[in-house]
Amino acid sequence: VNWDPQFETAISDLEVENTEVDGHMWHFKYPLQDGATYEYVEKDEDGNVTLRETRDYISIATTRPETMLGDGAVAVHPSDERYAPIVGKLCEIPVGPKEHRRLIPIITDDYPDPDFGSGAVKITGAHDFNDYAVAQRGNIPMYRLMDTKGHMRDDGAPYVEEAAKAQAIIDGTEMTREEIDRINIVPDDLRGLDRYAARKMVIDQITAEGLAVMVPADHPEVAWMKGQAPEWNHKGRADLQPLEDDAEGPSTLPMVEAKKIMQPFGDRSKVVIEPMLTDQWFVDAKTLAQPAITAVQDGTTKFVPENWDKTYFNWLNDIQPWCISRQLWWGHQIPVWYGPGLEGERLTADSDEDWMPSGVGLIEFCAGTEEEVRVKAEEYYGEPVQFVSQEDWVAKNFAGMLQPEAIPLYRDPDVLDTWFSSALWPFSTLGWPDQTPELDRYYKTDVLITGFDIIFFWVARMMMQGIHFMNEVPFHTVYINSIVVDGKGKKMSKSLGNIIDPLELIDQYGADATRYALASQEVQSRRTLRMSNQAAEGGRNFGTKLWNAARFADLNQCHATFLSGTKPYESHTDAIRVVGQHETVNRWIVGETARCAAAVDKALGEHKFNEAATALYDHIWKVFCDWYVEFAKPLLADGHPAQEETRATMAWALDQCLILLHPIMPFITEELWSVLAAERPKPLIHMNWPDLDLSLADEAADTEMNWVIRVIEGIRSVRAEMNVPAGAKIELVLTGHSPAVGERMLRNSQLIQRLARLSECAVADSAPEGSVTIALQDCAINLPLAGVIDVAAEKSRLDKAVGKISKEIMGLEKKLGNEGFLAKAPEEVVEEQRERMSIASSERDRLNAALERLAGIG
């Protein structure tokens, strides 16, 4: 397993961060038994001999010299002709007291790569995952070298005795894995040392004895150079200083390659993880995985976006046995108790010696509670049992404290992996294993929303356990949301100082503003979501806009409790039909509201949260607040015949905005719901979702009001582009129109004049001289500006602005066309430059359009 020496526990593969670091590879000689020799021959690709020499050793390369102490064999590939003469022979581990060094066999296995290093690999099964697999295949003994803190073991008998036990295995003595694990073959002078301190001593000892592979001092693969050293120096001694720049070094050096290596770090402890052979509990994940794979393949559970199912399948198809035990003090304790086996002689509690079975192993009892274990154990033993601590069991400190004839049991001290416990969440929270009403009602659950980084940590495990224990998937849909990063697209980090605390955002801008900022940027298939104060501020401004519109409605008595004297409504569609609309603007807003509800329904049904948020923003801010409220102001005046109708319509339309926005901004909407009516049938959170039919839309009203909006927006745009003074009221002349369009203009002239700041709306056959023309599909809007603005000055201003923006665009084009910049600059910087380019291009287009209009004035 992956062992974390900092936390002294096994950890999951998924909790290991493999990081590329600067490392070294040492080359050492393993002498052949009794000085045996062989002819070592190297050949090139064409079969020509490039090296031939007599050797009495086999060379290995390692990045972890301290683990040589636990070698069980040296392996070479079966096809490697260089070592064929010595396969099956024994070689000597080149460290430890000379007279007691262990001999290990030279074996063949498909694992070594003949083209990598020397082609020979030392096999340390207790401290390397690949070596462990080779040791299992070859029945090679595996010796654990370290304790839980990553220090060299200091338990057991002296090295001489322990090395003799290990040598006996090579000579044919059979031992169990547990017996081999108890052997401590760490030399006495290295016991108790930190693994890296032991590494330096091992390197020093091997090099001092002349068993390091030596190469010429100018060899290209030697890490040593003048003035620099890794864990050793030019003479292979850790206690000597490197050479000065002008010093003369030796002619040969130990072969130590400086190279990049992948090193495993604990994602929490940040220390180097030690692969280590330990006793753990495992789950047969391969068996559990197949039903979970099938459930997604046949569509029982779907991923949104669909592409994330590949991540799910890749992990489950290659899943390994799952280590579920952890040596920590938090978590669910393993539900297993241990007691002595029945076979063998058993000492009694009242004997002179401590109670302890003689020559027997342990038996395991698994159950949910101590009482269940007691029943099982007493049925097995036929005698009473008593629970003791593991410490008392190990120390045999329970003699005298046991009841007569009682048999001691102790509980496994390990706890379950957090993700094992978390995988039980969909049903364990509902009363399982009891068949509770909650379990019956709420399992399976509905939609799981989570991040892509825990698809294998959590999602896949919930699927495996849910199907196994409940015979049904835990959820029908898995929505994979984005991971929140900072405003520049960087992952949040304390060291970078770019952490955005959601609680601080809520304190400053409000919970609703923060929620809206997140929802509006949650785009399917986008891996990251940029969060910033500016995004939250935008959400706050949206909430403020809605609040002010609601305040306007309240001041104008647009209250929804009663609609024209009718009873409080339950059906949203029927409510608006009760009132009836005669005014075009009221018929228009009803249709716009129905369309907004349909867009939000569709977006939420497809889990496109940003599209739902955008549809609500466009409708509430741009349609309801910016246009309908302004259009309705004259109709709400005292004495206007449509006042009551408009009050009821505005109240209804505002209510629909609150209901539709409630899932994203629940607090402001619930507050406004309660204050905008003296009486409500129920709180907003309990209201039915709008069932607005698109038949509520009135095509004639839509056509007319959308035309009015285009006219007003066109005039406002020209005023801004032409720098028309805000207080100046200008004339509008309509040309190129049909009679129906002319009537539409006159019918809505007061609205257009008020909102576009016009002095008059007229229709004519031709445009006045000095007019700026806005071409619409069914007419032309002409604005006589010759006497209102200084045409020459405006042209000069616009020319300068176009020149400035064009210069900026040229600079951006040059930067974005530079392959070096694109390759080296951070992704967020490149994206920022592209956004600036897009904005600048749009601005230049706008300025050029204004210049064209000025040209029309003359």
Image (spheres, rainbow, N blue to C red):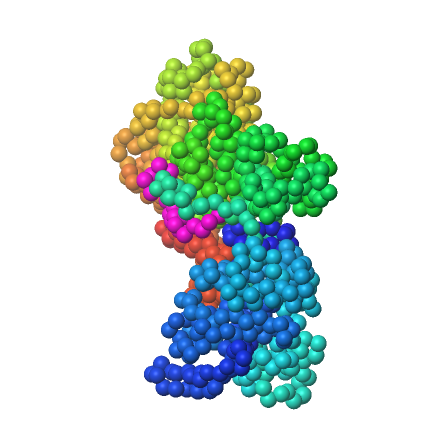
Q: Residue at x 54, y 80 (%)?
A: 34
Q: Is residue 443 above or below residue 110?
A: above
Q: Residue at x 71, y 44 (%)?
A: 353
Q: Which residues are magenta?
A: 296-322
Indicate the quadrant where residue 476 lies.
top left
Question: Which of 265/389 is in front?
Answer: 389
Question: Which of 521/803 is in front?
Answer: 521
Question: Which of 685/412 is in front?
Answer: 412
Q: Is residue 785 above or below residue 235?
A: above
Q: Residue at x 65, y 34 (%)?
A: 406
**Horizontal placement of 230 versus 802: left or right?**
right
Q: Position of residue 5 (x, y in %)?
A: 63, 56
Asked if the magenta segment contains residue 299, the reply would be: yes
Indicate the quadrant where residue 731 lies.
top left
Q: Position of residue 292 (x, y in %)?
A: 39, 41
Q: Residue at x 44, y 29 (%)?
A: 443
- Numbered disc total: 0
Q: Is residue 206 above or below residue 797?
A: below
Q: Position of residue 766 (x, y in %)?
A: 30, 41
Q: Is residue 809 above or below residue 612?
A: below
Quick one: which residue is furthest to the left in this view?
738
**Horizontal placement of 241 versus 570: left or right?**
right
Residue 360, can we see it? Answer: yes
**Horizontal placement of 549 versus 199: left or right?**
left
